[in-house]
Image: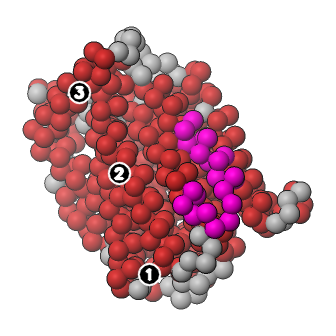
């Protein structure tokens, strides 16, 4: 393993930013948006508003990520860009506490900016993976990051759930004040635990001054990378496969709680199900990382896709709240694994010196998928008036993604890239 300080400084950022993913994106914001920010709107209307908000944030990242990735590679600015986007997300998370009841437009605006910060920072975080790992341990290092994310996000979320259920114990007037305080808590957590990466992880390439010529170089590098990718059919195949199946994964992450509420399940039960995901996800992600070390990474991804298809079938048939708990447990077994192994599988195919721009395209497709998934849910919900049909529609993405992934050969891709 490369420098352990770098590895753990890198992995610990997942502990930091997963607080936003867990508490804000997956946890309290969908609930609070329906009951507070968008109070008085129907369940279908608020679902559509949330879906369009997630889609807009992803679309903006789609436009920015590849070019910024090329610039970051040219000037060794990955850490700097990561910090810039992270602190945008941190500021927006804290600002959600200032939004009054019924002001759904302001809440959506801050939420979109917060998601841009979260996703933009993730682009450069992913790109730093090749700087702290090698081919032998990349699956483990990638899995370690996601596992720490589950644990860190779960710990803070557990504390926030306690606050929300016992507001008086913590000095709050009601649940709404406790939820707003949790948004501020996320900002502090994210800011503090980002510091190890910012101070201890070293970028190896010499920095160039950020000037107009650097922007031009970024465009040229982006053009060169795009040319390489389009001439390597294997990478195109993988990126298309990833685009499809990660669409389903991201949509389930973002819309699961909203779906449970649409089925009439109690909010407290939905929150506890998220805690199951966090604490089961921690060992499950490490187990998937170990599985990939002793088995082929691609086969492990296939296992995860198969489980997700079972998850969707189960979700469309749910009637009782205990079934939602089972659903949460199933998601926890594979969510971190499919994300971590997809990242490490891709990193094996690309040159380390171009990691940020290659991961710019990787996140380009990942975030573009995050546009289509929530948009698909929103449109199907509006036209069919059925939350079950909107979830069922996601299954085709996993099936098509698995078919394309079958034809990917990462070793051949890496060899072709070296000779390109």
Q: Which residues are magenta?
A: 87-107
Would you say the residues marked 3 and 1 are in contact, meaning their CB atoms lie under 8 Å apart?
no
Residue 146 vs residue 394, the one in the foreground: 394
Disc 2 residue crowd, few under 14, some 14–19, many 20+, Cα 10 Å: some
Residue in the picture at 66% in, 46% down: 94
Say which element carries label 1. Answer: helix
Residue 292 vs residue 159, the one in the foreground: 159
Q: Is residue 191 above or below residue 46?
A: above
Q: How far apart are labels 3 and 2 at the CA level?
A: 20 Å
Residue 71: x and y in percent read: 33, 25
Residue in the picture at 69% in, 60% down: 100
Disc 3 residue crowd, few under 14, some 14–19, many 20+, Cα 10 Å: some
Q: Can you identify the residue that label 1 sits on?
A: 387
Residue 74 vs residue 281, the one in the foreground: 74
Disc 1 residue crowd, few under 14, some 14–19, many 20+, Cα 10 Å: many
Say which element carries label 3. Answer: helix
Q: Is residue 417 rendered to the left or right of residue 353?
A: left
Q: How far apart are labels 3 and 1 at the CA level?
A: 43 Å
Quarter location, residue 220: top left
Quarter holding the C terminus? top left
**Disc on res. 219:** 3
Residue 299: x and y in percent read: 30, 55
- Of pointers 2 and 1, the one earlier in the residue sequence: 2
């Amino acid at each position: 393993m490369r420098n352990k300080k770098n590895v753990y400084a890198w992995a610990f950022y997942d502990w930091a930013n997963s607080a936003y993913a867990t508490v804000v994106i997956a946890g309290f914001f969908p609930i609070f948006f329906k009951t507070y920010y968008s109070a008085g709107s129907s369940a279908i209307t608020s679902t559509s508003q949330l879906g369009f908000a997630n889609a807009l944030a992803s679309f903006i990242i789609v436009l920015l990520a590849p070019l910024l990735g090329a610039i970051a590679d040219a000037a060794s600015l990955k850490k700097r860009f990561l910090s810039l986007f992270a602190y945008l997300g941190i500021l927006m998370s804290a600002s959600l506490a200032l939004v009054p009841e019924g002001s759904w437009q302001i809440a959506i605006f801050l939420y979109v900016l917060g998601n841009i910060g979260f996703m933009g920072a993730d682009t450069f975080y992913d790109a730093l993976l090749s700087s702290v790992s090698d081919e032998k341990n990349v699956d483990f290092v990638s899995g370690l990051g996601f596992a720490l994310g589950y644990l860190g996000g779960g710990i803070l979320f557990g504390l926030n759930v306690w606050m929300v259920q016992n507001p008086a114990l913590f000095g709050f007037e009601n649940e709404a004040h406790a939820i707003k305080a949790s948004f501020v808590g996320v900002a502090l957590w994210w800011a503090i635990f980002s510091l190890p990466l910012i101070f201890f992880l070293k970028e190896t390439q010499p920095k160039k001054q950020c000037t107009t010529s650097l922007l031009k170089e970024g465009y040229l590098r982006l053009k060169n990378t795009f040319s390489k990718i389009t001439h390597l059919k294997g990478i195109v195949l993988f990126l298309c496969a990833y685009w499809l199946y990660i669409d389903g994964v991201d949509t389930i992450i973002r819309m699961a709680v909203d779906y449970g509420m649409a089925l009439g399940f109690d909010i407290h039960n939905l929150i506890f199900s998220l805690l199951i995901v966090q604490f089961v996800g921690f060992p499950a992600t490490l187990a998937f990382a170990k599985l990939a070390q002793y088995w082929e990474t691609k086969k492990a991804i296939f296992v995860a896709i198969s489980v997700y298809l079972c998850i969707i079938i189960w979700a469309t048939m749910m009637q009782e709240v205990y079934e939602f708990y089972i659903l949460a447990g199933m998601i926890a077994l594979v969510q971190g694994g499919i994300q971590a192994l997809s990242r490490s599988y891709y990193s094996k195919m690309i040159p380390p010196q171009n990691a940020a721009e290659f991961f710019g395209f990787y996140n380009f497709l990942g975030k573009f998928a995050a546009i289509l998934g929530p948009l698909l849910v929103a449109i199907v919900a509006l036209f069919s008036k059925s939350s079950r049909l909107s979830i069922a529609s996601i299954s085709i993405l996993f099936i098509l993604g698995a078919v394309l992934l079958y034809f990917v050969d990462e070793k051949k891709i890496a060899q072709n890239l070296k000779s390109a």
